[in-house]
Image: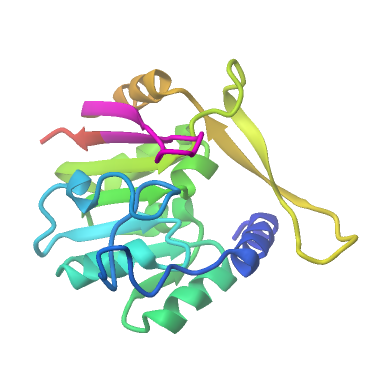
Amino acid sequence: MREQDAGAWDVWGAVRPGRKEANAAGAATWFNWTQWPDHGPDEKVLGDLSGARILDLGCGSGGNLAHLVALGSEAVGVDISPVQVGKARGRWPHLDVRQQAAEEFLAAGTYDFSAVYSVFGAAWFTDPAELLPLVHARLAPGGVYAFSHNPPALSGCYGPQASQMQPPEKGVEPMYVKRWDYEAGAWAEILRQAGFTDVTTEVIAPPEGKRTGTLLARGVRAS
């Protein structure tokens, strides 16, 4: 377990509000790829979910995972933060949530998934040179890998960058984790080089009045 990263994500989880009780349509569970509520595509990005075995890398407090389970999927979530795992288990006790680093879970596993996804999670905060071969190996033939996160904040600043987690207590030093920033076209090439086909990448425009869109990438393990 990467203790320093776990501590930083505990800081994030402690100050992060949980998912609302219902969305704008009144649904108790829903899938959200973007940082904006009630915005963007839904779980159909992952393909046919009926009875599918699905893995959430960096599941956080479990909102997306709970929706997939409600749809009948056999879904597993992993998160490095004990605080986030505790939130997920507290709100949705029926979820299969593991406290573990994504790459450790993938490397230790013995069964395949129909889809693997990450929403502002491990796909953004793990070196793709390490993560993508592990994901590819754990996907069933024809399986989908999809992830979303913010587009690069600064043009020309690509690859590993620092993300700051500021504890709520005054006078406490911030903690840092690495994220991997690439533009949509660069992610497409990285996914192809890792063996994924039918690759698509896009930046989803933000809602009216917001400035930051969401980068969404998708690839398929060849049959």
Kindly give the residue lying farthest to the top in the view shown.
Answer: 156
Above or below — where is 117 with respect to 127?
Answer: below
Q: Nearer the viewer, residue 154 or 60?
A: 154
Residue name at image x 32 percent, y 49 percent: 117
Above or below — where is 215 with respect to 188?
Answer: below
Residue name at image x 33 percent, y 28 percent: 202
**Quadrant of the snapshot with the C terminus:** top left
Image quarter of residue 2? bottom right
**Quadrant of the snapshot with the N terminus:** bottom right
Instruction: Give the side of residue 55 with respect to residue 113, left or right.
Output: right
Instruction: Count up the numbered dots.
Output: 0
Q: Nearer the viewer, residue 116 or 194?
A: 116
Which contiguous range is marked in magenta?
A: 198-218
Q: Is residue 209 magenta?
A: yes
**What colour-coding does the image apply?**
rainbow
Instruction: Give the side of residue 12 with respect to residue 98, left or right.
Output: right
Q: Nearer the viewer, residue 25 or 86?
A: 25
Q: Residue 105, percent across and down?
A: 42, 58
Q: Residue 26, percent across and down?
A: 26, 70
Image quarter of residue 214? top left
Residue name at image x 20 percent, y 47 percent: 46
Q: Residue 61, percent across and down?
A: 46, 68
Kindly give the residue lying farthest to the right in the view shown.
Answer: 171
Q: Residue 126, percent across and down?
A: 52, 42
Q: Is residue 36 magenta?
A: no
Residue name at image x 68 percent, y 63 percent: 11
Above or below — where is 197 with respect to 166?
Answer: above
Image quarter of residue 37? bottom left
